[in-house]
Image (tube, rainbow, N blue to C red):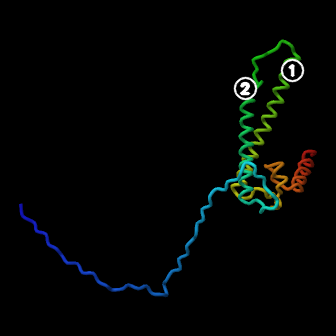
């Protein structure tokens, strides 16, 4: 095998300065990304009129209120469906008892259906919170008001707009 020899090369560095022409300098804009820590509120917090309307505290308060309400409704529906008096095992020979049982079951199912619709409305309200449009009328974009939202957290309209919608529904229902 032939022997290989290592040859060291001397590398010289040039000290020439490279400059950019000033005419082609690009303006670089730096975007500051502000990461906000999640706002925590106490369990006894109640939104006040003195605070800015729909500030972060208000949004957190209503998000918590809506999610707890939804959780309670889902639990109540599950209890009614799986552990309630919805069993059809007890068939009575008495016609009156059968009719009463049928009526009770029918009323209970209507209540469950109303709660399912309410859960859907709660989901829509939570989506409005994420989109930063919660608390404002979907028709007029005016603030709904804290008192109304405290009474009905899934409210979509101001009282005036809600009355208008109900009036239109009544007119169309009569047709």
| CA separation in Å, label 2 and label 1 | 21 Å
Q: Which residue does the image show at 74% across and 60% down from the upper left?
A: 55
> Which is nearer the eye, 98 or 20?
20
Find residue 56 and report its horizontal and vertical position in percent: 71, 58
Please tell me which residue is depicted at 81% across the width and 33% down the height of the picture: 110
Please name whichever residue, 84 or 25, is drawn nearer the observer in this view of the structure.
84
Q: Which residue occupies the extreme left position in the image?
A: 1
**Position of residue 93 in the picture relative to residue 78 (left or right):** right
In the image, which disc is placed on residue 69?
Answer: none
Residue occupying image coordinates x 86% and y 20%: 99
Disc 1 is placed on an element classified as helix
Q: Is 127 situated above or below 28?
A: above
Residue 31 as seen in the image, left or right of residue 105: left
On the rendered image, what quadrant is the N terminus found in?
Answer: bottom left
Q: Secondary structure at mark 2?
A: helix
The residue wearing badge 1 is 99
Residue of label 2: 83
Q: Residue furthest top?
A: 93
Nearest the camera: 13 or 118? 13
Q: Residues within 10 Å of mark 2 (few under 14, many from 20)?
A: few
């Amino acid at each position: 095998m032939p022997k290989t020899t290592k040859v060291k090369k001397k590398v010289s560095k040039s000290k020439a300065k490279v400059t950019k022409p000033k005419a082609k300098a690009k303006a670089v804009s730096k975007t500051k990304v502000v990461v906000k820590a999640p706002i925590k509120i106490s369990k006894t917090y109640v939104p006040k009129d003195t605070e800015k309307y729909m500030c972060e505290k208000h949004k957190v308060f209503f998000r918590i209120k809506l999610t707890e309400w939804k959780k309670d409704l889902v639990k109540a529906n599950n209890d009614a469906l799986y552990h309630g008096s919805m069993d059809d095992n007890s068939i009575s020979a008495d016609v009156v008892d059968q009719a009463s049982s049928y009526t009770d079951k029918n009323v209970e199912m209507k209540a469950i259906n109303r709660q399912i619709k309410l859960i859907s409305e709660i989901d829509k309200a939570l989506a409005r919170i994420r989109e930063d449009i919660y608390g404002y009328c979907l028709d007029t974009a005016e603030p709904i008001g804290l008192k109304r939202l405290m009474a009905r957290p899934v409210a979509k309209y101001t009282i005036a707009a809600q009355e208008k919608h109900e009036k239109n529904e009544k007119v169309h229902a009569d047709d």
